[in-house]
Amino acid sequence: MCGIVGIIGQSPVNQAIYDGLTVLQHRGQDAAGIVTIDDENRFRLRKANGLVSDVFQQVHMLRLQGNAGIGHVRYPTAGSSSVSEAQPFYVNSPYGLTLVHNGNLTNSEQLKKTLYERARRHVNTNSDSEILLNILAYHLDHIYTQHLSPEDIFHAIKATNNDIRGAYACIAMIIGHGMVAFRDPNGIRPLVLGKREENGKTEYIFASESTALDVVGFEFVRDIQPGEAVYITFDGQFYAQQCADNPKLTPCIFEYVYFARPDSYIDGVSVYAARVHMGKYLGEKIAREWPDLDIDVVIPVPETSNDIALQIAHILNKPYRQGFVKNRYVGRTFIMPGQTQRVSAVRRKLNTISSEFKGKNVLLVDDSIVRGTTSEQIVDMARAAGAKKIYFASAAPEIRYPNVYGIDMPTKHELIAYGREVDEIAKLIGVDKLIFQDLDALTQSVQQENPAIKDFDCSVFTGKYVTGDITPEYLDHIADLRNDSAKKKREKDATNLEMHNES
């Protein structure tokens, strides 16, 4: 999961992109970057590891001149967390091209070979985003014209779509031409369009979530459709075209469960409303299957599950309490690169209000259970605070399969639900009872807000991947890349390389 923003207008965009990235910080805390195009048609780039507020100081903002730019917040789903893999990426040929990408390509190894054999293009990092940029550059380079028409750009996007597989929401800038945004044919990752009037002219914004538009004063226009490309020239001409043969909207359902902010709208769905519906369905299931359970209080694991837990408490007619205080400055734990780091992060991330636990039978509510690391630690904290019995409800079904479309969920063997029944999982995380949301109820929670969405990417629950190209061999390959030992090695190699470069 990453967050992307692109703004093209009549006034400096550096502050607006910065502000947009800050409200997308939940989508990635590993690195941040912004690139603008100045009056002399040069890229102005700043990117580094860290939070948005740490990466961009006043001196950097002053250098990011120009009325068009793109930004990115990252956590690594492919490659390492080396600063060399932070985005945006750019290439000098053709024209001068820069790109940000949210998602994950599933045929990146094949594409890397193709780029070298067909185009003699070298990819310098392990990032699939750099591969995607070079594929697009290759197709633009073969149009053989000095000034690209909208049809030329859409032709290059179509060719790119034919080459690449997986999930991608992208924003690119072409020096001397304009900004183009495009989304994969399945619409797995989100991308929205907004506009505002400034001095009698229209400025446009693209972003991963609608909340980024709100904070900078843009009006939401619509979602970019699956397979669609939108091209806006630097003088404000707007063009849009479908660039995929068989587009079908199958968004990642985990956006609504966990990743997106509750104040966002994605593909016509209020994330907040979807989570309220999740709480309703889960509360009804608890009432149905645990009718005699003695629950004294319902407590959410903050913050994604707050709205879900409140609805459950209402249905069960039980008190809702905030039993945990969250430190907002610790990153999301299941995407952290090592088990030791994840365990210590949970303790730094949450602290209990002991009076809400002492002597009570507590129903804890969380959005999901991935590795089980966070859940186990939270249960331990609740018991240490004096809880008598602990029941646990997950707003998502059992996660049994890895995600290949841009969420760094671990290999199946690191998933606590893989190959285990509910009672076994309950014992491992140390709860007295455990209940999971049904998949049908989860999908209905989102479809209630937009019945036009007929299907979702639910691969982490079902093992069925919507792109149809995921083989056991590919899953074994990403397992080798994603397991904790491999990540530790990449982090060590990246650190050594950066220390060498600095010396």
Image (cartoon, grey):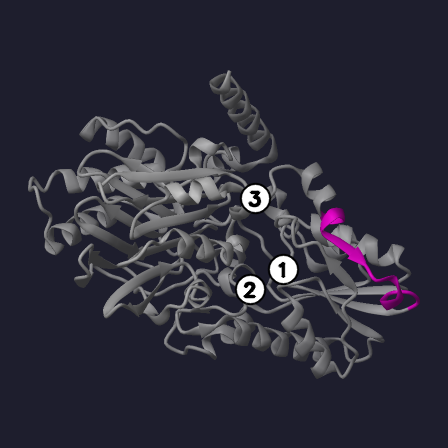
- In the rendered structure, the answer to whether residue 468 lies left or right of residue 380 reads left
**Extreme right residue here?**
359
First in sequence: mark 1 vs mark 2: 2
Q: CA distance from mark 2 to mark 3?
A: 18 Å
Q: Which residue is mark 3?
A: 410
Please name which of the two marks, 2 or 3, marks the residue nearer to the observer. Answer: 2
- Any mark on residue 257, and which? 2
Question: Alpha-carbon neighbours of circle 2 within 10 Å: few (<14), some, or many (≥20)?
Answer: many
Q: Secondary structure at mark 2?
A: helix
The amino acid sitting under disc 1 is Ser
Q: Is residue 229 above or below residue 177?
A: below
Number of the label disc, if any, that sits on residue 296:
none
Q: Residue at x 76, y 48 (%)?
A: 347
Residues drawn in magenta: 346-359
x, y percentage for residue 56?
A: 48, 43
Q: CA distance from mark 1 to mark 2?
A: 8 Å
- Left or right: residue 444 compared with residue 99: right
Name the kind of residue labelled 3 in the image.
Pro
Horizontal side of residue 185 vs 152, given as left or right: right
- The mark found on residue 368 in the picture is 1
Does the magenta run of residues contain 357? yes
Q: Are marks 1 and 2 in contact (CB under 8 Å)?
A: yes
Say which element carries label 3: loop
Q: Answer whether residue 215 is visible to the viewer in this image.
A: yes
Image x and y of residue 122, in percent: 28, 26
CA separation in Å, label 1 and label 3: 14 Å
Eyeballing the image, is 407 above or below 474? below
- The residue at the point 57 percent across, 72 percent down is 275
